[in-house]
Image (tube, grey):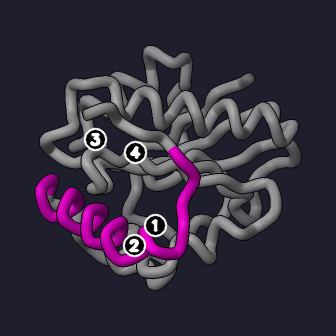
């Protein structure tokens, strides 16, 4: 069956939070200062009701297999938005799901008039970092904004 890409809905909250935490445990980055302990992870549909934000869900056979969004994180420079919560289930990797979710999020950023996309990640997520680099994200030497995810130590920026 085909993969469906759609915007987040309230009914997705529990399954999406479960998927995110499973993936963080898989990569052993389930620690304080990440979305693992962030209370907003349990109600992401509410978070993305924020103006000029968007969150995309990848669904296959009624199951959520990934998600990614953009969010106007506090403290970012004018015209900059954060690429947030890009996760794909283990069985969905290598099929272009993450890349499609990232592209849909970047298109949303352009739609809202942003001219830069910032992200935070971990060195353990080598496949994701490689994908970001192929999409022309450049590494930064320090964090931007106030995401509250102090454990992240890879920072990247895409100029649109």
How far apart are the two marked residues, 4 and 2, measured between alpha carbons?
26 Å
Label 3 – label 4 distance at C-alpha: 24 Å
Q: Mark 1 packing: few (<14 Cα in 10 Å), some, or many (20+)?
A: few
Secondary structure under tag 4 reads strand
**Separation of marks 4 and 1 at Cα, in angstroms:** 27 Å
Give me the disc on residue 150: 1
Residue 16 circle label: none
SS for callout 2: loop
Q: Residue at x 81, y 62 (%)?
A: 51
What residue would you read off at disc 4? 58
Residue 64's quadrant in the figure?
A: bottom left
Q: Secondary structure at mark 3?
A: loop
The percent coordinates of residue 50 (x first, y second) are 75, 68
Is there CB contact under 8 Å for labels 1 and 2? yes
- Quarter holding the C terminus is top right
What residue would you read off at disc 2? 33
Crowding near the residue tagged with mark 4, few <14, some 14–19, many ≥20 C-alpha atoms within 10 Å:
many
Look at 60% across and 39% down and name the residue there. 105
| Rendered-image quadrant of the N terminus | top left
Q: Earlier in the sequence, mark 4 or mark 1?
A: 4
Residue bounds of the magenta highlight: 6-27
| Mark 4 vs 2, N-terminal side | 2
Q: CA distance from mark 1 to mark 3?
A: 14 Å
- Of circles 3 and 4, the one toward us is 4
- Residue 117 or residue 104, whichever sits in front: 104
Nearer-N-terminus badge (1/2): 2
User: Do the CB atoms of the residues marked 4 and 1 lie less than 8 Å apart?
Assistant: no
Q: Which residue is mark 3?
A: 123
x, y percentage for residue 155? 50, 42
């Amino acid at each position: 069956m085909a993969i469906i890409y759609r915007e987040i809905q309230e009914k997705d909250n529990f399954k999406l939070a479960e998927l995110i935490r499973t993936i963080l445990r898989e990569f052993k980055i389930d620690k304080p200062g990440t979305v693992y302990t962030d209370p907003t992870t349990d109600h992401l549909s509410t978070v993305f009701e924020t103006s000029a934000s968007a969150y995309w869900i990848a669904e296959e056979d009624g199951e959520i297999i990934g998600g990614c969004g953009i969010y106007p994180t506090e403290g970012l420079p004018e015209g900059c938005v954060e690429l947030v919560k890009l996760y794909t289930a283990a069985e969905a990797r290598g099929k272009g799901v993450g890349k499609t979710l990232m592209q849909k999020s970047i298109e949303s950023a352009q739609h809202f008039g942003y001219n830069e996309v910032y992200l935070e990640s971990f060195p353990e997520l080598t496949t994701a970092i490689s994908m970001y680099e192929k999409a022309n994200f450049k590494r930064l030497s320090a964090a931007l904004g106030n995401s509250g995810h102090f454990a992240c130590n890879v920072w990247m920026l895409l100029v649109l």
